[in-house]
Amino acid sequence: MTVPMNKVIPFRRPSLKEKARGRTLCGSGFHKWRIDNKKQFDVKQGRLVTIHRCERCGETKSTLK
Ligand SMILES: [Zn+2]
């Protein structure tokens, strides 16, 4: 069985949409957090904190260990 050459498969271009979706998620506070390997010492609290960085927008947050 042969596939007709003129059959056009709808081309999906997700890149822009995906990026926009990611930005929307970040804007809504749903960041894609990844733990930054660098451990930081919070001088104010005198404790070790873990830095989380968002893969999409680069925002950072820290949590106390
Ligand atoms: Zn983000």
Image: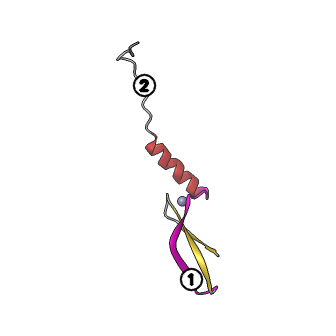
Q: Quadrant of residue 11?
A: top left
Region of the chain picked out in magenta, as a range: 28-45
Circle 1 crowding by C-alpha within 10 Å: few under 14, some 14–19, many from 20: few
State which tag comes first along the sequence, 1 or 2: 2
- For the N terminus, give its image quadrant: top left
Please give the label number shown on residue 62.
Answer: none
Q: Residue furthest left?
A: 5
Q: Is residue 62 left or right of residue 56?
A: right
Q: Is residue 30 left or right of residue 36?
A: right
Residue, x 35% and y 17% (percent of image)?
5
Whether residue 22 is in magenta: the answer is: no
Residue, x 46% and y 40% (percent of image)?
14
Q: Can you identify the residue that label 2 sits on?
A: 9
Nearer to us in this view, 25 or 50: 50
Looking at the rendered structure, the kind of residue marked 1 is Phe
Judge whether 23 appears above or below 36 on screen.
above
Residue 48 position, x and y percent, is 60, 81
- The residue carrying mark 1 has its beta carbon less than 8 Å from ligand 1: no
Residue 61 position, x and y percent, is 58, 70
Looking at the rendered structure, the kind of residue marked 2 is Ile
Judge whether 32 appears above or below 47 on screen.
above
Q: Is residue 37 left or right of residue 29?
A: left
Q: Residue furthest front?
A: 1
Q: Is residue 12 left or right of residue 34?
A: left
Q: Can you identify the residue that label 1 sits on?
A: 41
Residue, x 48% and y 49% (percent of image)?
19
Query: Quarter of the picture for ligand 1?
Result: bottom right
